[in-house]
Each structure stands twice: as C-alpha cells, then as structure tokens.
Image (spheres, grey):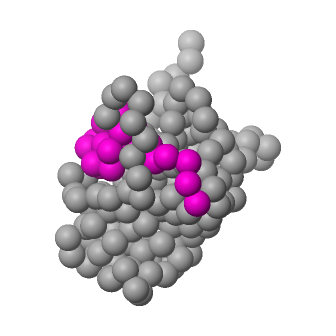
Amino acid sequence: MEQPLVLSAQINISEWLESKLDNNTSMLKEILTILRKDNTTRLKEVAYGKRSYQSSTYIHGHPSSSHLAVNGNIHTMIHTTTENSPYWEVDLGRIYRIKRVEIYNRRDCCGDRLHDLDITVGPSHNRMSLCTHYTGPGINGAHLIFDCHRTESGRYVNLRIKEGEAINLMEDKVYAIE
C-alpha cells in the first residue's frame, strides 16, 4: 500500500520538487526557477482595469479594442490592423517597479504573429527602457512569462512589434514589486 505524501513545514517545497525531477525535464526546471524568484519577491498584478491604447483596431465583427487585454478575461482579444510597428500600451496611472509581464497569446490561430516584440517600460513616453525582447514566433494559446532584465520603474508598459504585422492577444498582465 502506497504511503500518503506528508511534508514537514521544515522542508523547502522547491527543494523537494527538484529532488523529484528528472534531469531531462527542462520545462519543470524553468517553472522551479520562476517559483524561486517569486519566493524572494512579492509581486502584484497592476494592469487590471487600467487605461490602455493600441496603434489601431481591426474591425472583424466583434470587439477587439485595447481595454480587452486588461479586463481579466482570457477569452476576449485585442487586435490591431496589419501595420508597420504596431503597439499596445497600458497606462498604470502611477509609477511602479515593474518586474514581469505576462502575455496570453491568441488561441484560435495566428499565434505566430507575436514575434520580434519589444516590451518597454517607462515613467513617460520619451523615457522608455527595454524590459525584454521576444524573438518568437509565438504559439497559439501560449501563456508567455517575461521577467524584465532588471526591475524597471514605469507608469507605461508598451508592447511593440518591430515590423509590419498585427498584434492580437488575449490578455496582458503586468507585475510590480510590492
């Protein structure tokens, strides 16, 4: 008869998980790395319900405007037209110490449109710094987690594809250090 798993409060959960991993399971190791980072810093999602903008809006029978990326619903989608250097941006209302950006990519098709993406953060539009760059291409329905190269102070978070393309994503979350 198999014994139930009982963990003592003294055991570090990430150490226990790592002991159970097969060395070839790189995805689980990546998750552990993220868990360890989260354990050292408390992060708070700060983009929900905030004012947002996008370079254009593709009209295709149902809403696709910018606010749908910060409404907490991963079943609604923002969509720009195909254009040179399309962007989506959120105004957080005040300056935060930004650590992470998460993107829920489009599910039904066209996930590969998310490529050559710069995520920038700044206190004003003329003082934006690169949080990270995503080469891509994206995958339909992927949940992408980007940690900034360093913590960035900013009120604005901008997602911009460098070339002619459309941005279409389901949700964008921005995490700041509490």
In the image, what residue occupies the spot 46% across and 47% down? 80
In the image, what residue occupies the spot 37% across and 62% down? 89
The answer, for residue 64, to whether it is visible in the render is: yes
Q: Nearer the viewer, residue 56 or 72?
A: 56
Q: Is residue 153 above or below residue 16?
A: below
Q: Is residue 129 above or below residue 175?
A: below
Q: Is residue 77 magenta?
A: yes
In the image, what residue occupies the spot 51% across and 58% down? 86
Which of the 4 image quarters holds residue 63?
Answer: top left
The answer, for residue 174, to whether it is visible in the render is: no
Q: Nearer the viewer, residue 13 or 91?
A: 91
Q: Is residue 99 left or right of residue 115?
A: left
**Residue farthest to the right?**
24
Measured from the top left, where is residue 134 in percent x and y?
63, 60
Measured from the top left, where is residue 77 in percent x and y?
39, 37
Position of the C terminus by quadrant:
bottom left
Measured from the top left, where is residue 73 in percent x and y?
31, 36
Q: Is residue 116 magenta?
A: no
How many numbered callouts? 0
Position of the N terminus by quadrant:
top right
Q: Nearer the viewer, residue 28 or 123?
A: 123
In the image, what residue occupies the spot 55% across and 54% down? 83
Q: Is residue 67 left or right of residue 113?
A: left
Which of the 4 image quarters holds residue 127?
Answer: bottom left
**Residue farthest to the bottom?**
127
Q: Is residue 33 left or right of residue 152?
A: right
Query: What is the magenta range?
Result: 64-84
Measured from the top left, where is residue 136 in percent x and y?
68, 52
